[in-house]
Each structure stands twice: as C-alpha cells, then as structure tokens.
Amino acid sequence: MDSATDSPRRPALSPLLREAFATLGPAFYTDVAPWTLPDPYWVVRSRALARELGLDDAWLESDEALQALSGNALLTGSTPRAGVYSGHQFGLWAGQLGDGRALSLGELDAPGGPQELQIKGAGRTPYSRRGDGRAVLRSSIREFLCSEAMHGLGIPTTRALCVTGADVPIRREEMETAAVLTRTAPSFLRFGHFEHFSHHGQHAELRRLADHVIDRFYPACRDTDRFSGNPYAALLEAVSERTAALLAQWQAVGFCHGVMNTDNMSILGLTLDYGPFQFMDAFSFGHICNHTDVQGRYAFGKQPNVAYWNLFCLGQALLPLIDDSDLALAALESYKTVYPREYEGRMRAKLGLPDAHPDDRVLIESLLKLMAQGGVDFTLFWRRLSQWAATRVPAPTALPGEDPAAAPVRDLFLDRAAADHWMLQYSERTIAIPRGLMANFMLKTNPKYVLRNHLAEIAIRQAKLKDFTEVENLLTVLQNPFDEHPAHEDWAGLPPEWAAAIEISCSS
C-alpha cells in the first residue's frame, strides 16, 4: 500500500506557491504529507486553465509537474494542508467533516488574482473518517470535465487543471484504479467552515474566518450602511445573492448537483464538489440524479429551496457575530428577490427576449410544464428552438405545424397540438424582435453541448483502457459548448436508451 514514509522531493523549478491558511492559524487545518502515487501517468490536462494561471506549457508537460501533481513531490513554497469543517448532510447535522482526501498545496499568484491549488485523492487525512483518502479514475474524470464544462457555460465554478492516474487498485462498488485531480479556486471555503466553529463555540476563530472572507473577497461589506453597518450581516446578504445567482444559472441550464449539503456550498458562490451531478436529459422537476438520494431531497426542482435552507444554516452559524436574529433574517431576504429575478432573466434570454413583459412568467411556466409532461430533452429543445428562431415565418398567424422549420422542435413533444399552441404564443410574443438578432442571442445562450452522463461514461470506459482520446475530445468541445463542432454532431443528439440505466452516487 502507498504511504507517506518517504519525504517528498522538492523540485527547484516548480511554480512558486505561498501558504493559503497561514493567516488563519492551526485551528483551521492540519499539515498532511500526501501519499505517493507509484508510476503515475497523465490522464488529461487543461492547457487553457494552465495559461490563465500563468503556468508554462513546458512545465505542464514535464515529469516534474507529473510528480508534483500526483503527490510525489512538493511544489516550491508548498505546505500541504487539509482543512477542517462541519456541516449538514441530507438535512441532518453530520458533525465534524473536513478535507478527507483533498490537500491544499498553497496559493498561486495567477494573472487574474491568487488561486488556491488543491490535489484531490492524495491519501488519508485526519478528516477521512472511514475513507481511504483516495479518488478513483472515474470520478476524477467526471469532476475534471464538468468543472471545465461549467466554466465554458459561464457558470461560476471551481476549475480543474489536470488528472493523473496510476495502476493502484481502489475498491468502491467494484475494483477501480487511483487518480489524483488538481483543482483551483480563489478559495475552497464552504458554509461548513463557519458551521464548524460556530457549533463548537469557537467564536474567536469564527470571527477570524469571517473577517478573512470579508477583507479578501467581500470588502464592500465593511463600508455598507445596510444592517446598521454590521459587516457580518452584510456578508450573509452578499453570499445569499451570489448563491441565488448561481442557482438561477443551474436551473436555466438543467444542471443537477446531486448532493447540496452545506459542506458542499461555496462561500464565494461557486459550483463546488462534483459528485453525483447530471445535466438533465428528459426534463422533469422531480429528477433525481443521485441514486443514493432515496428521499429526493436534492431533486432538480428543489435545488433553489435547498440553497435557501443552506443559507439559513449559514445565517445561524454567523449569528454569534451578527448578534441579532432579525438582522440575520433580513440579510437572507435578498435571496427571495434575487433568485426569481435572475432566473426569469436567464429564461427570457433562452427565449431570445431582450425586454421583460408581464406575461413572460406565464409563457415560461407553461413551456416547462409542457416539457415536463412529455419528458422533452432539455438541452436539445433549447438549441432547436434557437435554430427555429432564425428561420421561422415571421407572422403571428403562421401556424407552427405549417412551418417546415418548426418540425425539429415539434418532434420533441408527444402532444403536438399543445406544442403548436405554445409556439404560436411564442411567435406572437417575439414578432417585433429581429430574427437575426434574436437567433444570435439564443445560440450564444443555449449550449449545443453539455456533459451528458453517457458521454462521460463512454470516455471513462476508454480511459480505463488507458485510451484518453475521448476525454481530450470532450474537453475541447465542452470548453466551447455554444460552437457547432460538426465532427461531434452525434454528441448533441438524444441520448441512447442505455443512458437511462446509468446510476451515479456519492461513491468516488
């Protein structure tokens, strides 16, 4: 079994890192040496992210990088550390959690600002509980691809730099092989960090953490006149608004997170911890992507309310600092206005509507109800609607059933008459909008490609045979999901029947 008995070598030419947790103190982390990964190999690298981080292409190709990002060497200035946090899991207090297999290597001075570098799957930490601290190839590829796919869609997310693998057996539901994912973010701090120190009555540490987050990421909270100048209430409001905007983006693109525990919620409003996620195929408000979520707590349609519940937990954690429950509740109220505003704005954009109209909500709700009744493919519908917008007959009296260009949209519905009725209403709503402008807007809003489960599954099956071609091809397409990519047209079609049998759980 791999171990940390050998002291990792420290390459001289590594990117220079600085300590990420140094200002917070030892209550927030434990120094942990990563386990070595025997004979690692490259699985996939995001050269686009490497350039954004200011990393040299030659370094990312080097054995030095391979060893360092597999846990076998230390980057210059790096002190690997695992952070402690707590949280609510599936609505219940789970107590102390923490980085059970993720290690923060430190912060990189990137051109766009400091970025924390983490490796995930580099061995056991004091917070692994009963886990082995390892990650497997399957889940590492899924998180890598989805991180970069979400960035391509313009949705706030942690990023993924690379995946390395090794022929080390790891048992999950079946025997798999080990992998290490390198990911980045301005910070990986979670709601659960605040819950941890609040729950244990460590109010000095709680204040230190809140001050760190405010001073670094939310400085405007210091200068606000809102909430009688209380910066901690202002922080809660700011996080609520970022979270609301994030959830609106998830819902608009049909993304299901699958395990929205408070320890998986980013204090910066980033999509964090890609486990049993899914981009929906057949649309359903009740869709559950995590087959271990037997109660459907994290079903697609429940995600916005779950996010508010998680924010309420964050508010409770911050209460010792806010010191006024009414003030905390007032800070949470912004979620209830920001989410519907952001969501309706994004849905109008998907429909190519540049301005709001009082009847738009009815138009959107009636469409989603119709899509849910027929299990219409979510991504395919919006892309076909975008294409029809460019070609349809620009007259409100033209029936969709008489317009050949409408056939690809109508064919997605079982109830064609109901689809025709909605499309006629939509035509009447958009009659005054120039076709070219509308279609261009929609085609840049509604992606042609998302990381469907079956696409990831095919790439993973090949990767298990050490053929990473499909992973690389998917990365290229998903980084530019609004482009046509004619060589991969089949990836934009309906999923195969076997895709419905894919089960995704928290196991990784």
Image: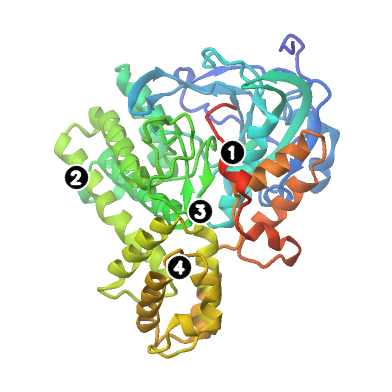
10 Å neighbourhood of mark 2: few (<14), some, or many (≥20)? some
Q: Say what amino acid the circle numbered 3 marks.
A: Ile
Q: Earlier in the sequence, mark 1 or mark 2?
A: 2
Q: Nearer the viewer, mark 4 or mark 3?
A: 4
According to the picture, the residue beneath numbered tag 2 turns out to be 330
Q: Nearer the viewer, mark 1 or mark 2?
A: 1
Q: Which residue is mark 1?
A: 502
Disc 4 from disc 3: Cα separation: 15 Å
What amino acid type should be assigned to the residue bearing mark 2? Ala
Q: As shown in the figure, which amino acid type bears the numbered disc 1?
A: Ile
User: Which residue occupies 70% across, 51% down?
Assistant: 474
From this viewpoint, is residue 180 visible? yes
Specify few, some or many for label 4: CA neighbours under 10 Å numbering under 14, 14-19, or 20 or more.
many
Give the mark nearest the N terminus, 4 or 3.
3
Disc 4 target residue: 350
Mark nearest the camera among 1 and 4 is 1
Image quarter in which the C terminus is found: top right
Q: Residue 387: where, in percent of width, then height?
A: 56, 75
Question: Of callouts 1 and 3, which one flags the residue occurring earlier in the amino acid sequence?
Answer: 3
**What amino acid is labelled 4 in the image?**
Lys
Residue, x 51% and y 82% (percent of image)? 437
Q: Which mark is residue 155?
A: 3
